[in-house]
Amino acid sequence: MITQGKVDLHCHTKASDNTLTVREVIESAKIAGISHLAITDHDTTLGLAEAITLGEQQGIHIIPGIEISAYDYNRNRRAHILGYYIMQGHPAITEICNPIVEQRHQASMQMVKQLIEAGYNLTWEQVQQYAKGGSAVYKQHIMNALMDNGYCSEILGELHKKLFSRSGEGDQPGIAYIPLQYVDAATAIKAIREAGGIPVLAHPGQLNNYEAIAEWVEIGLEGIEVFHPSHNKAGEVEKAKAYAQTYNLVMTGGSDFHGGYGNMAYPLGSIDAGLANLQALIDRRAERASV
């Protein structure tokens, strides 16, 4: 039984779209007093081995995880599926995630090309420098280059909306918006289970995924992210808790830390999932292993 510590179960590194390297994230976790940290980079396990090693050195228990970018094709909306305690490099994960990573990288290259054609002063080589050491180039890296070139003063501000929004003025998408083809959420859930992990629905309030929960529980969903920066509206946490109770789902939570590319009001460790919920996650894993 875990009796003390701070728990953050949603954190990214430079392996995906955080400004901080794995080492810098672990060092920040130590300063924040975190005892248990889940590394959940988007569609990649690139930094997990290093994180586990560095975590051991700093006395931080690293939970190997992932956040799969998925889509609910029955309801036409995005969905993010967290996977905890996954086996690193498992074929079930790489087979669905590697194509997403490659597609994202190619889309970013096309975005940069369109921005250059629209008159913006930047180069693909410059953008790549911000993603160095990661799995792919993200929109945040493009925005970082634009900010450094004087086009804006923040990464996720008005220019980001103008360039990359799914619908802009007159319901027209941003001038550099390129849609991605994501894996079906059900496929993501099954892949995480096949890789020995616990599938958890990330921030359902943010993407409005509640009505899919009953369907996904039937195919293996085992948890729901209750505590998250986007769950800051009145009643949102209570709503997520109610679904957890109804469907016997493990409750998780975390800061969804992205460093300089995230919400600065929620630094690493600012949202504590709680020791009881961490123990419930560990117990669920043990139950799965005993079957």
Image: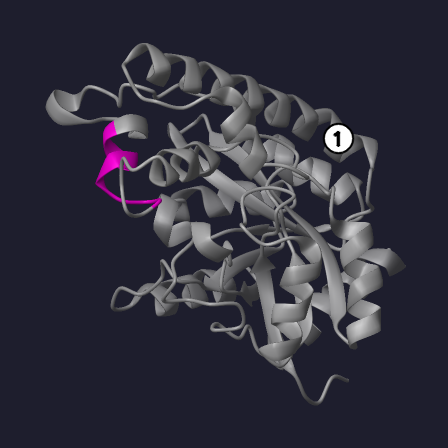
**Residue lying furthest top:** 117
List x then y, in percent, for residue 135.
Answer: 66, 34
* Residue found at the very far bottom of the displayed protein: 3
Left or right for 257, reference 266:
right
Q: Residue 60 location, x and y as percent?
A: 75, 73
Q: Is residue 157 magenta?
A: yes
Quarter-wise, where is residue 104 in the image? top right
Q: What secondary structure is marked by label 1? A: helix
Query: Residue 92's quadrant in the figure?
Result: top right
- Locate the C terminus and report the quarter of the image it occupies: bottom right
**Which amino acid, mark 1?**
Thr
At x 48%, y 47%, the residue is 213
Report x, y in % for residue 236.
33, 64
Q: Return the residue at label 1.
A: 94
Q: How is the image coloured?
A: one colour
Indicate the position of residue 195 as horizontal and vertical percent values: 79, 42
User: Which residues, given as a range, are shown in magenta?
Assistant: 155-162
Q: Is 243 included in the stretch rendered in magenta?
A: no
Q: Is residue 269 above or below residue 154?
A: below
- In the displayed structure, does residue 44 sit left or right of residue 149? right
Q: Residues within 10 Å of mark 1 (few under 14, many from 20)?
A: some
Q: Is residue 3 above or below residue 256?
A: below
State the predominant SS element of the stretch in magenta: helix
Is residue 179 shown to the viewer in this render?
Answer: yes
Residue at screen point 50% across, 63% down? 244
User: Depth check: 189 or 131 in front?
Assistant: 131
Q: At 50% across and 54% down in the image, what residue appears?
A: 258
Q: Is residue 7 above or below residue 201?
A: below
Q: Who is closer to the viewer here, 198 or 3?
A: 3
Quarter holding the N terminus?
bottom right
Q: Residue at x 28, y 27 (%)?
A: 163
